[in-house]
């Protein structure tokens, strides 16, 4: 059976080698930026992006941002029932989104999700490795089960998603892939009570550099974003306890809002960063300059 994306491309007369479905002419966008770049470099029309952990928090925000830049978006999460409202919101704004169920701790689930994604929208060239869980107990209070849950999601899960994405692009002889790992400033700094979480994010940053080196000649870029403390459902408990104390230590006197990550996300997802790989963009209002947690 012909994949859905291929059928729609043929029906609409779009080029099959640049799915899905929207013909995009860079020459029609000539607004110059400093350094000679154009806004067209940031346009994602004709590209498909997959966001893990899209059901809430940063993942939800990332999906809407990518759609707003023209990408067709695959919404991936374990809790697919929570993705329906997001898909409707994207479609109401003129975008296109599809839902796939993905548990990043399961190889079989990852493979099935990518198979479905390619059938629905064709080659997935942009991956946002966002799925993650927090752990805020001190080391002597943790058990092995908690260690494994955090590492299986934040590190091994991200690695397996990246591998599955890259393998399909390599097998299809396609270049132009961009994998964006969502890390944390806790992967760069030390803090009390977050040893396992910090270790998982530090390892993710190391993985980012290693994969960038390994896959660069295959035309696949791998970069990371290391946000400061972002107000999401995942961090609510932390903010309730420490927000008032921390805000005075941050040079720009603010916590990171999900929308503050829009620019870095679009930079790394788009051709504007075509010569960037193995890089980590720190977005923390200067918090890591005087880090205290």
Image (spheres, helix red, strand yellow):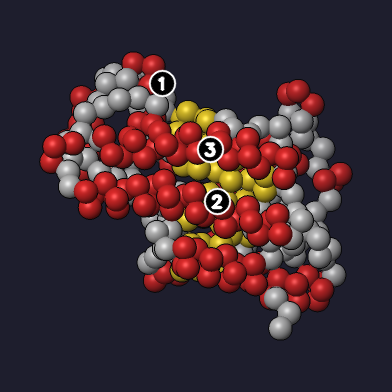
In front here: 260 or 220?
A: 220
Instruction: Classify 10 Å Cα crowding around label 1: few (below 14), some (14-19), many (20 and above).
Output: some
Left or right, residue 214 beside residue 194: right
Q: In the drawing, what numbered circle is on residue 172?
A: none
23 on left or right of 111 = right
- The residue carrying mark 1 is 286
Pointer 3: what residue?
Answer: 208
Q: Where residue 241 sits: x, y (%)?
A: 17, 35
Q: Could you tell me which secondary element the residue under label 3 belongs to?
A: helix
**Quick one: which residue is furthest to the bottom in this view?**
1
Q: Which residue lies at the image location 34% right of the left edge and 16% below the top edge?
A: 290
One can see residue 260 in this view? no
- Mark 2 or mark 3, which has the lower sequence index? 2
In which image quadrant can residue 231 be found?
top left
Where does the image place residue 204, in percent across and percent down from the top left? 45, 39
Query: Between marks 2 and 3, how big is the CA–CA gap?
Result: 10 Å
Crowding at mark 2 (Cα within 10 Å: few <14, some 14-19, many 20+): many
Tell us which disc is closer to us: 1 or 3.
Answer: 3
Residue 76 point in image, percent of width and height:
48, 62
Q: Which type of secondary structure does the marked residue at label 2 adopt?
A: helix
Vertical position of residue 172 compared to residue 9: above or below: above
SS for dot 1: loop
Identify the residue at image location x=61%, y=64%.
96
> What residue is drawn where x is 76% and y is 30%?
37
Q: CA distance from mark 2 to mark 1?
A: 29 Å
Whether pointer 1 and pointer 3 mark residues with C-beta atoms closer than 8 Å, the reply is: no
Q: Residue at x 61, y 37 (%)?
A: 212
The quadrant in which residue 251 appears is top left
The crowd level at tag 3 (other Cα within 10 Å; few <14, some 14-19, many 20+) is many
Residue identifier under label 2: 162
Cβ–Cβ under 8 Å for marks 2 and 1:
no
């Amino acid at each position: 059976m012909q994949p859905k994306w291929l059928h729609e491309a043929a029906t609409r007369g779009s080029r099959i080698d640049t799915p899905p479905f929207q013909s995009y002419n860079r020459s029609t966008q000539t607004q110059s930026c400093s350094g000679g770049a154009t806004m067209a470099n940031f346009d994602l029309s004709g590209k498909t992006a997959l966001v893990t952990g899209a059901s809430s928090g940063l993942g939800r925000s990332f999906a809407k941002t990518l759609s707003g830049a023209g990408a067709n978006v695959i919404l991936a999460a374990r809790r697919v029932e929570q993705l329906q409202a997001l898909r409707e919101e994207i479609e109401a704004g003129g975008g296109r989104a599809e839902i796939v169920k993905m548990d990043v701790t399961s190889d079989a689930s990852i493979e099935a999700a990518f198979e479905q994604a390619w059938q629905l929208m064709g080659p997935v060239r942009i991956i946002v490795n966002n799925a993650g869980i927090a752990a805020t107990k001190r080391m002597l209070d943790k058990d092995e089960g908690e260690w494994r849950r955090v590492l299986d999601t934040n590190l091994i899960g991200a690695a397996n998603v990246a591998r599955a994405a890259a393998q399909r692009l390599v097998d299809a002889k396609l270049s132009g892939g961009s994998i964006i790992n969502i890390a944390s400033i806790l992967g760069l700094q030390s803090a009390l009570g977050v040893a396992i979480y910090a270790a998982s994010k530090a390892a993710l940053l190391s993985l980012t550099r290693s994969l960038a080196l390994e896959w660069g000649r295959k035309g696949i870029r791998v970069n990371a974003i290391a946000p400061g403390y972002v107000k999401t459902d995942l961090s609510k408990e932390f903010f309730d306890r420490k927000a008032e104390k921390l805000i005075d230590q941050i040079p720009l006197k603010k916590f990171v809002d999900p929308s503050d990550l829009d620019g870095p996300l679009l930079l790394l997802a788009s051709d504007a960063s075509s010569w960037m790989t193995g890089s980590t963009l720190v977005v923390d209002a200067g918090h890591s300059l005087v880090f205290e947690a």
